[in-house]
Amino acid sequence: MLDRRLQLHLAAWLGQWPAGPGLHVVGSHRRARPAWDGRLRPALAVDTGRSGVLSVAPDRVAAIRALAHDVPDRLLAALPEAVGRPEFCLHDGPFRWSVAPAPLPDVGEWTASTAPGLPPWLRLFDRPVLVVRDADGTYLAGAGIKRHDAYGHELAIGTVPAARGRGLARRLVAQAARRVLDEGAVPTYLHEWDNVASARVAEAAGFPDRGWRAYGVYPR
């Protein structure tokens, strides 16, 4: 049975869940409002392989429904222009979640996103981020939590090239996932199809590929 928190997250994030067979285009005012980082996400979709929900701004529903009969690759390619953001890019990859992260030992410390020495992407978060530093305090790896709503929190991870291959990322993901679960939400993890390294991290941290897909239109 699908975790109740995940169902509530998808309903809040997309505007409808669950859905019957096929692709359902729904309108959500969240697609016209800034997301967790202050930027728009004008199209978001989650597809289980049997059914899916594609969420767009209410004034774009009719136009997207007219495209929804097309084959998935053509629909995806047409989305940025169809939602009025041709300058935005596409995301397409597995949609992963976990209620049982791998029992890996903690490796990071929670710190303010304004702490010195952190990369710019971690400074987008308005709550503490999880960070690994070396003995002299140099940043090695970090994780942030995108709190989309009360029920679903997406994990973001990054490791500097010199620190890769040490297993830091998988341990950070598992550690951050446990915090999300403690907060009463379900942790999710998204990456592009061709990001093999990120896929390995997800699998090792307890986020299996269940055959679900997430795609959408994001700012560059």
Image (cartoon, rainbow, N blue to C red):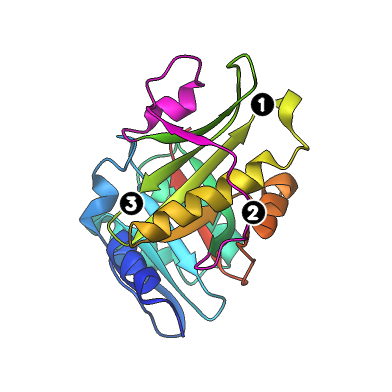
What is the crowding at mark 2: few (fewer than 14 residues within 10 Å), some, or many (at least 20)? some
Which quarter of the figure has residue 12?
A: bottom left
Is label 1 in a helix, a strand or a loop? loop
Q: Is residue 136 left or right of residue 217?
A: right
Q: Amino acid at mark 1?
A: Val
Q: Is residue 87 shown to the viewer in this render?
A: no
Cα separation between marks 3 and 1: 26 Å
Q: For the residue carrying disc 3, how many other residues have a C-alpha within 10 Å: few (<14), some (14-19), or many (20+)?
A: some
Report if the CB atoms under discs 1 and 2 are less than 8 Å apart. no
Q: Is residue 197 left or right of residue 1?
A: right
Foreground: disc 3 or disc 2:
2
Q: Quadrant of residue 165?
A: top right
Determine whether, in the image, residue 193 is placed left or right of residue 149. Answer: right
Residue 91 in the image, given as x and y percentages of width and height: 54, 48
Q: How many marks?
A: 3
Asked whether residue 75 is drawn in magenta, I would say no
| Residue located beneath label 3 in the image | 148
The first of marks 3 and 2 along the sequence is: 2
Magenta segment boundaries in residue numbering: 98-127
Whichever of callouts 3 and 1 sits on the residue coming sooner in the sequence is 3
Disc 1 target residue = 160
Q: Position of residue 22 (x, y in %)?
A: 47, 80
Amino acid type of the residue tagged 3 in the rendering = His
Rounded to the nearest angstrom, the CA distance separating label 1 from label 2 is: 20 Å
How far across and how far down the image is residue 188, in percent?
Answer: 48, 58
Relative vertical location of residue 162 with respect to residue 182 in this rendering, above or below: above
Residue at 60% over, 40% down? 107
> What residue is at 30 percent from the left and 71 percent from the top?
16
| Residue beneath disc 2 | 104
